[in-house]
Image (cartoon, helix red, strand yellow):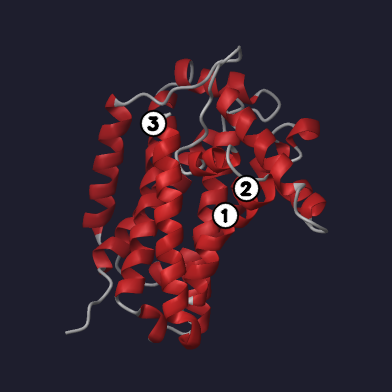
Amino acid sequence: MKYRVNPFLSWALSSAFLLAVISGILLAYPFHEKAPFVSTVGIDTVVPYGWFLRRLHYFSSWATLILLLWHAGEALWARAEERRRPLPWLALSLSLPLIFLAAFTGYVIRWDETGKLAGFIAESLSLKLPVIGPYLNALLFTVREGGIHRPYLFHFWASLVLLGLYGIWHFRARRWPAEPFLLVFAVCGALALFLPVGLHAPGPHLLVKGPWFFVGVQEALRHAPPFLAGILLPSLGPTFYFLVRVPSLRRLSLFGLILWSAGYGMLTLWGLLR
């Protein structure tokens, strides 16, 4: 009997992302791009139930990341690349780096010490890319000159693109099952009620860690040149995943993906425990 991707998981992923988009739209109203850190603090302390919305956005984004990785792993286990046409597999492969970039820019636009550090590192790394580096930086970051303007725009437009990618295959059903959405909302809502989402206030900090999925890059930068640690390393995972669909490269790509996942996971764990 062939293994099939769990449809409940697909609906839970779509529900988590939809919850993140809705909460993000509501947060955009009291957020001011020219005073991002003050706005974030104000949302937590002044805006009615703003603290709950910000935490809900935070944890639903976490749920989206985790469920997407789970969904991508299930697709590999089910050998979905053999049944799917090239376009759906390309959409799934592209959604992996895009969702991480969207989450990463979400950290940057808080503009606390974590956000600033992440933005400065990302800008420096993008400029290391030959030829396209300055253009990529102008599209995504330019935080030293323009603050959070570019990351804020990318965070918004990337969410719309992802909504379109998910919508093509996951929102076509005439009836949206309520159970996955209610479960995701209950879990994320409970976390939002009881777990605070901290901010690094401006000031001297001996060690500021970026978001958990970026800690592996930070740790790699301690041991390898910026191009290898900050550009080549994070791009290998999605590349291996996409190449699994090529029959002649499937076994080699799977081996590379497993090796990359283990290596990046170890770097992330080492960085988190530092």
Residue at position x 39%, y 68% from top?
170
Nearer the observer, 43 or 104? 104
In percent of width and height, residue 7 lies at: 27, 68
Distance from the alpha carbon under mark 3 to that under mark 2: 20 Å
**Mark 2 residue crowding within 10 angstroms, few (<14) / some (14–19) / many (20+):** many
In percent of width and height, residue 176 lies at: 30, 63
Q: Is residue 199 left or right of residue 192?
A: right
- Amino acid type assigned to the residue bearing label 2 in the image: Gly
Q: Is residue 102 above or below residue 253?
A: above
Q: Is residue 46 above or below residue 1?
A: above
Distance from the alpha carbon under mark 1 to that under mark 2: 6 Å
Residue behind mark 3: 273
Proximity of marks 1 and 2: CB atoms separated by less than 8 Å: yes
**Label 3: which secondary element:** helix
**Mark 3 residue crowding within 10 angstroms, few (<14) / some (14–19) / many (20+):** few
**Mark 1 residue crowding within 10 angstroms, few (<14) / some (14–19) / many (20+):** some
> How many numbered badges does the structure rendering display?
3
| Residue 61, visible in the rendered structure | no
Residue at position x 47%, y 47% from top?
21
**Label 2: which secondary element:** helix
In percent of width and height, residue 184 lies at: 28, 48
- Amino acid type assigned to the residue bearing label 3 in the image: Leu
Nearer the observer, 33 or 201? 201
Q: Is residue 171 above or below residue 66?
A: below
Residue behind mark 2: 230
Disc 1 or 3, which lies upstream in sequence? 1
Residue at position x 25%, y 41% from top?
187
Residue behind mark 1: 233
Distance from the alpha carbon under mark 1 to that under mark 3: 20 Å
In percent of width and height, residue 195 lies at: 31, 26
Q: Is residue 20 left or right of residue 2?
A: right
